[in-house]
Image (cartoon, rainbow, N blue to C red):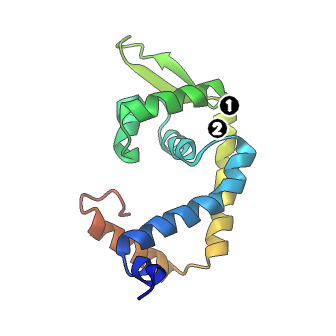
């Protein structure tokens, strides 16, 4: 068995390759917007609910504050988010979308549609992927 065949037989390598290929599909859009894939995921969270703390964002993203803090600082410097002290508890810092960050949501919807079209996945394919991911992460992060 060749090295490539051994790698291809490993489930972890299949997920690793799939993740890299998906990020490669996103890259032209994200490069145009001047953000990374991780920053795009932060935007997704803020589009869902604006005004979140680092702790709030860390849960769905599965990233710690040591990773999120510099990432959010770069997003702030890029004009995508702004920080604001919570009016009820000045110790809490909330992150809000700027106009620039809000405007990207429309473009992201188009991007997602284009990527789904490129992948040519059926609804059954998407459901199967969701089922597999739910088995990997039974606490529900990857389910509907």
Vertical order, 34 against 86 (above or below): below
**Residue name at image x 48 percent, y 43 percent:** 45
> At numbered mark 1, what does the secondary structure look like: helix, strand or loop?
helix
Q: Nearer the viewer, residue 83 or 35?
A: 35
> Residue 64 or 86: which is nearer the viewer?
64
Q: Residue at x 62, y 79 (%)?
A: 120
Side of 134 where 42 appears, left or right:
right
Compared across the picture, whether 53 is left or right of 120 comes to: left
Residue highlighted by disc 2: 102
Image location (x, y in percent) of residue 35? 64, 41
Image coordinates of residue 13 in percent, x first then y, are: 42, 70
**How many residues crowd around disc 1 within 10 Å: few (fewer than 14), some, or many (20 or more)?**
few
Q: Residue 83 appears at what percent x and percent y?
A: 52, 21
Tell me which corner region of the image, top left, top right, bottom left or bottom right, holds residue 88.
Answer: top left
Task: Report the Cα–Cα distance between label 2 and label 1.
Answer: 5 Å
Residue situated furthest bottom in the rendering: 1
Residue neighbourhood size for the residue with mark 2, other residues' Cα within 10 Å, grouped as few (<14), some (14–19), many (≥20): some
Cβ–Cβ under 8 Å for marks 2 and 1: yes
Image quarter in which the N terminus is found:
bottom left
Q: Residue at x 37, y 31 (%)?
A: 65
Question: Where on the picture, by quarter, is residue 24?
Answer: bottom right
Task: Identify whether 68 is placed above or below 134.
Answer: above
Disc ID at residue 99 = 1
Q: Quadrant of the C terminus?
A: bottom left
Q: Nearer the viewer, residue 39 or 70?
A: 70
Q: Quick one: which residue is furthest to the top in this view?
A: 90
Residue occupying image coordinates x 41% and y 45%: 61
The residue most toward the front is 2
139 relative to 7 in the view: left or right: left
Furthest residue toward left: 138
Identify whether 23 is placed above or below 51: below
């Amino acid at each position: 068995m060749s090295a490539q065949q051994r790698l291809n037989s490993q489930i972890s390598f299949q997920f690793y390759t799939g993740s890299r290929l998906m990020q490669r599909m996103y890259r032209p859009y994200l490069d145009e917007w001047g953000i990374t894939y991780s920053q795009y995921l932060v935007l997704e969270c803020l589009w869902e609910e604006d005004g979140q703390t680092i702790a709030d964002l860390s849960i769905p993203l599965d990233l710690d504050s040591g990773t999120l803090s510099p990432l959010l600082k770069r997003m702030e410097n890029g004009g995508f988010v702004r920080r604001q002290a919570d009016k009820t508890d000045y110790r809490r810092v909330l992150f809000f979308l700027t106009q620039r960050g809000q405007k990207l949501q429309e473009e992201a919807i188009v991007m997602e549609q284009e990527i789904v079209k490129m992948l040519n996945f059926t609804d059954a394919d998407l459901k199967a992927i969701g089922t597999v991911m739910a088995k990997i992460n039974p606490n529900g992060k990857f389910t509907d």
